Image (cartoon, grey):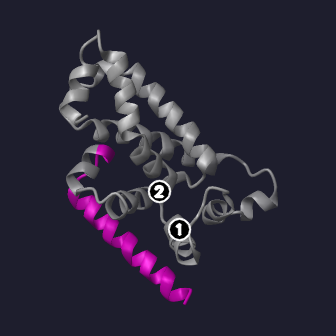
Amino acid sequence: MDDRQIKDLIQDPKTLRRGFELMVRQYSEQLYWQVRRIVLTHDDTNDILQNAYLKAWNSIESFKGESKIITWLSRIAINEALDFTRRQKNRPALSTDDETLGLANQLVADRYFDGDETEAQLQEAIATLPDVQRTVFNLRYFDEMKYSEISSILGTSEGALKASYHIAVKKIADFFHKHD
């Protein structure tokens, strides 16, 4: 189904539930990877997506159809993921082992990770970026989103996003040069 058909279904109270189910099915994989690139673990990603879908369901009447469905869902899911990472950073570590286990190490240790050494190194470089730069980089590089879409999701100007992306690319390149 295309975006317009799903919008029509979710805006009609008689077909809302069916439209929401189709929406979840249509965009789950894309949202999964958007969130996964922020939090890096499969289990955390699933938890965040569940929360995002609950928020989407509870606020479905506020969706007016002015943006793409994926833009609206991405905004909810990415904000949930960023909130999660902020809470994780503010939570005291349980042990020194937890403190030393970085985001990239968590990814490689995750049984769902199937990347090679270069992918692990890229994820390690991305994990060193501040949350917003990491999110902008992931959306632009992996999801190939236009700056206008990212702007709509993050509520930031396109100029600021371009600057964030280019700074992120520079930091990643520097990371690879240091680790060669």
Residue at point 50%, 44% (across, down): 81
Type of amino acid at the residue the image marks with label 2: Asp
Nearer-N-terminus badge (2/1): 1
110 vs 127, nearest the viewer: 110
141 vs 23, nearest the viewer: 23
User: Is residue 126 in sight in this rendering?
Assistant: yes
Task: Measuring from the top left, give residue 149's x and y in whole percent.
Answer: 24, 49
Residue at point 24%, 14% (across, down): 12
Element carrying mark 1: helix
Is 70 left or right of 43, judged from the image as shown?
Answer: left
Type of amino acid at the residue the image marks with label 1: Gln
Q: Quadrant of residue 45?
A: top right
Residue at the far front in the pictured view: 1
Residue, disc 2:
131
Numbered range of the magenta stretch: 153-180
Label 1 CA crowd tier, 10 Å (few <14, some 14–19, many 20+): many
